[in-house]
Amino acid sequence: MPSNILSYILYSSREIERKEQVKKIQEIFPSSTIIDPIFPEFQKVPFLKKIIQKSKDYTGKALLTNEVGVFLSHRKVWQAISKSINKKQHYLVLESDSKIVNAKIIKNNYAKVEQEYDLFFWGAWNNHVSIKKSSRKSISDNYVIGEPLIKSVYGAYGYSLNAETAQYLLSITKKIHFPVDLYKQYIDETKIKIGAIKSEVIGTWQTTDSNIRKENQFDKFKRILIIKIFHTRNQILAYFC
């Protein structure tokens, strides 16, 4: 078990309502480093309009201003990690709304994950990640780890990676076209080894509004329904992988 898990938390002092949530993370991971996220509404982002227009030209759908900010914020973390001398050491990346569900599982399996994977999701898509049957390994009665179906991995609220992977992510995201958590659009699975855990040990509090987009009740219902449909499909696909 590692005695000191190094982590980065994307958190701004403007997020007053999330202060206590971040404090809970720091109590569990005392060696956390706070990284100030990028909010385009409060600070100038070079070529912001050009980035948004290019995303629309490339995908047919323009990125939201805050989606660009979130992406640039994670790139900021990757830049810090990429400078690590130990290229294989993992760094945990968290957001201000991250919730540590099971710290013991993280700490007990962190060294194993560090050795076997380049990028690992301790939480993804609100616990709807699908792990390929051929790669599943049980680590306790309620948890398995393995290679996730790439199309089932969304979210950037609880993942770890090493310096080499941070450098790789920086290189493939020089042109921002999709949201940061649409990994299937950026990552070549033959280049890095990806892992995930099920059930998730890092989730989100969901007690404050998203910093990306506001949703009414109908939007939330529609999103949950879509997730359920695609999760069922992904579970079937993962079973035959």
Image (cartoon, helix red, strand yellow):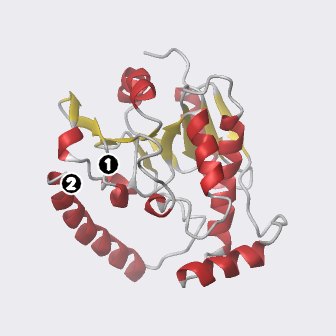
Q: Which mark is residue 148?
A: 1
Residue 169 location (% of width, % of height):
59, 49
For this rendering, which residue is in front, 239 or 104?
239
Residue for badge 2: 238
| Residue 9 seen from this side | yes
Q: Amino acid at mark 2?
A: Ala
Q: Residue furthest front?
A: 190
Residue 238 location (% of width, % of height):
21, 54
Residue 38 vertical position relative to residue 140 in the rendered view, above or below: below
Residue 189 vertical position relative to residue 229 in the rendered view, above or below: above
- Specify whether 71 is left or right of 232: right
Mark 2, Cα crowd under 10 Å, few <14 / some 14-19 / many 20+, is many
Mark pair 1, 2: CA separation: 8 Å
Residue 141 location (% of width, % of height):
17, 30
Residue 62 location (% of width, % of height):
60, 81
Mark 1, Cα crowd under 10 Å, few <14 / some 14-19 / many 20+, is many
- Specify whether 129 is left or right of 123: left
- The answer to whether mark 1 and mark 2 are in CB contact below 8 A is yes
| Residue 74 seen from this side | no
Say which residue appears at 32% left-offset and 48% top-offset: 148
Task: Point out the tag, 1 or 2, that comes first from the N-terminus.
Answer: 1
- Specify whether 11 is left or right of 229: right
Badge count: 2
Local SS, label 1 = loop
Q: Within the image, what quadrant is residue 31 found in?
A: top right
